[in-house]
Image (tube, rainbow, N blue to C red):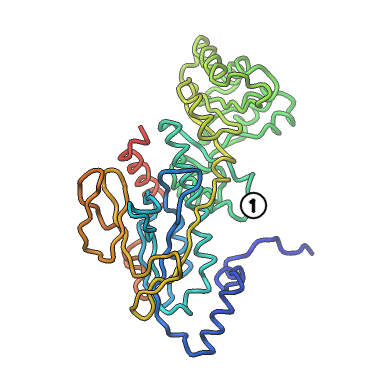
Amino acid sequence: MSEKLFIADEDEIRNGTVMDVYFDRTKKILDAKGLSDMKVVAEFTSGGLPNKWPWAVFCGLEEVIRLVEGLPIDLYAVPEGTIFKARDSASVRVPLMNIAGAYADFGVYETAMLGMLCQPSGVATSSARVKCAAKGKTVFAFGNRRMHPGIAGVLDRSCYVGGCDGVSSTFGADLCGTEAVGTVPHALMLSMGSNEAAFKAFDEIIDPKVARIMLIDTFEDERAAAVAACRSVKDLKGVRLDTPSSRRGNFKELINEVRWELDINGYRDVKIIASGGLNEDSIKAIVDSAVAGFGVGTSIANAPTLDFSMDIIEKEGRPISKRGKFSGRKFAYRCPCCFEMGVSLSPEDHIECEKCKVEMEMIERPVLKNGKRVSPAMSPADIRKSVLEQLKVLGELQ
């Protein structure tokens, strides 16, 4: 009998098995000292963003909601998909989420809640930056093979929310409400013995609803293989270049050569998809070529996590905090034009953006009241749409 895989299941997460042990110890002490009912407000903030990113995408809120829904707490947050900056002009950390209730009721979930926000927000931000680098061209997320399979759904959803047009796993696609995308691995060509045999077998066996995009770099020169793919598959939609770096040379020129060969042979409607170790910078180098889209894996899936923290900032109605953090219940504001942030102790403040000279908007929303949802969940598609619209406002996306 095989042993259990090295991954916590949902019950183990809900039961607190994956929490840092000191939270469990804290709860035991509070219970023993009669402090189980002590009411606090805890805020979630980030001290700064990695890689000198000027902005980030808030992602993972829906999973946090599902984790703590039903607890006797109130939860407030900026909407999932909000593009934010970590601090306001006075260097005050922007509160992206606030929890009000007895600490003993929710403190043991701090580890899980932070993990559900930190990594997804990093991945979504990287996805959004890649989408911007691609100048709006199609981007597919292919990074699951670089990460533990237990988080495939988290990665795919975060990639999609951030702006990727499709994800590669069926599990992730189901979460996103989309169909999984992908071509074939080089293993098929190697197993079949030739590109042509693999192309024809794919066309014969795979559901016609699946777009015919053939991987063409296994054996032959990409120009010849691209034309051969067109001749082998009647309704070919595209060819994918996954050319190894040792053979790539000038990738932009290679893409344009393939485009030329396709065009002069009458295959102008066949698109070119590029993949293979692509990142934000390498995409910028080829985006103005004849490429129609990109398959991006490790650089998005392995994005740096955002360093969120949860801190108590109010106890029994009075401001309190540890050193280095600003005490008191605070509210997040944002300029509608440039997305500079503001922080206030009042939800009805009037804060003017120093840059744009317009009034900022208070962007926090109630999410749970005594553990119950106060508004329906946003779909991943709606969150993604919101992210792309915000990127256009910033002028980051064409």
Query: Vertically, is 321 above or below 61?
Result: below
Residue 195, quarter of picture: top right
Residue at image position (46%, 46%) is: 125
**Pointer 1 local density, CA inside 10 Å: few below 14, some 14–19, many at least 20:** few
Relative placement, left or right, of 191 versus 339 is: right
Query: Vertically, is 334 above or below 167?
Result: below
- Camera-side residue of 28 and 15: 28
Q: How many marks?
A: 1
Q: Residue 353: x and y, percent?
A: 24, 49
Image quadrant occupied by the C terminus? top left
Image quadrant occupied by the N terminus? bottom right
- Camera-side residue of 145 and 113: 113
Residue at image position (70%, 28%) is: 189
At numbered mark 1, what does the secondary structure look like: helix, strand or loop? loop
Residue at image position (31%, 47%) is: 339
Residue at image position (42%, 83%) is: 38
Relative placement, left or right, of 270 versus 369 is: right
Relative placement, left or right, of 384 versus 352 is: right
Q: Name the residue type under label 1.
A: His
> Which residue is the site of mark 1?
148
Q: Residue 210: x and y, percent?
A: 53, 36
Q: Residue 198: x and y, percent?
A: 67, 28
Relative placement, left or right, of 364 versus 186 is: left
Query: Vertically, is 146 above or below 214?
Result: below
Residue sitting farthest toward the top: 264
Q: Residue 51: x and y, percent?
A: 50, 43
Residue sitting farthest toward the front: 323
Query: Vertically, is 315 above or below 152?
Result: below
